[in-house]
Amino acid sequence: MSPISILISALILTHLLTGESQDFTKRIPKNSLGLRKEKLSHLHFYFHDIVSGRHPTAVRVASAAMTNTSSTLFGAVVMMDDPLTVGPEPDSKQVGRAQGIYASASLNELGFLMVLNYAFTEGKYNGSTLSILGRNPPLSAVREMPVVGGSGLFRFARGYAQARTHFLYPLTFCLHVGKNGTG
Ligand SMILES: *[C@@H]1O[C@H](CO)[C@@H](O)[C@H](O)[C@H]1NC(C)=O
Ligand SMILES: *[C@@H]1O[C@H](CO)[C@@H](O)[C@H](O)[C@H]1NC(C)=O
């Protein structure tokens, strides 16, 4: 379970709006997209990545011949659909899901390539998403990952996410990063 703090802001891409007009492009007023002033928001939630047991939320979908003998599980590709909650408890109110892929992309230390969407389901953010593309070394205290965009209320979003591990189930962890390896 990792608490994730996200600092996001809606960006107005002025270079898109002021470029030369061509046949296939036209200028449009900012407010036609509902864009007003850039706003900063801070989101905080927990995500629950369950890789073992009867109801896993993350499953390995691919690996390389060397993956199981690699101390970093290099080449493992995991698909996740993790609940996002307001509190650290698994039964705490759910506000969305973290859906996407993490893949072991580092030969020498544990480091995941994260490609995922936060799909929100609560309140005014219901139906809106934020997209994350970044590097996640899970053993580091704080991992920073860029918010590369979003949809719905988060159109034009930019920002960063900071992940901190709140609690790690030792068995779950072993299964994922240490099995047949050195971790
Ligand atoms: C590697 O380990 C995983 C998890 O224990 C297992 O599901 C998979 O079959 C193993 N792959 C190979 C090639 O041994
Ligand atoms: C979120 O939106 C979906 C689809 O419009 C709707 O079915 C659902 O009830 C909404 N959830 C909340 C908590 O508003």
Image (spheres, rainbow, N blue to C red):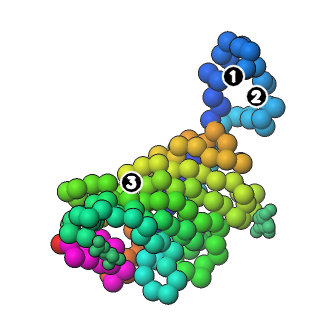
Disc 1 to disc 2: CB gap under 8 Å: yes
- Residue 94, magenta (yes or no): no
Query: Among all residues in the image, which is located at the extreme right?
Result: 32
Q: Which residues are magenta?
A: 171-181
Residue 153 percent location from the top left of the image: 71, 48
Q: Amino acid at mark 2?
A: Lys
Residue positioned 68% across, 17% down in the render: 18
Q: Mark 2 Cα within 10 Å, few/some/many (few <14, many 20+)? A: some
Q: Looking at the picture, tell me which residue is in the foreground, 111 or 78.
A: 78
Alpha-carbon span between mark 1 and mark 2: 8 Å
Q: Is residue 81 left or right of residue 153?
A: left
Q: Amino acid at mark 3?
A: Leu
Q: Amino acid at mark 1?
A: Leu
- Residue 176, magenta (yes or no): yes
Residue 30 got which mark?
2
Residue positioned 47% across, 48% down in the render: 133
Q: Earlier in the sequence, mark 2 or mark 3?
A: 2
Q: Which residue is mark 3?
A: 113
Q: Is residue 146 visible?
A: yes
Residue positioned 57% across, 71% down in the render: 83
110 over 146 or under it: above or below: below
Residue 17 got which mark?
1
- Secondary structure found at label 3: strand
Query: Among all residues in the image, which is located at the extreme bottom?
Result: 54
150 over 142 or under it: above or below: above
The quadrant in which residue 175 appears is bottom left
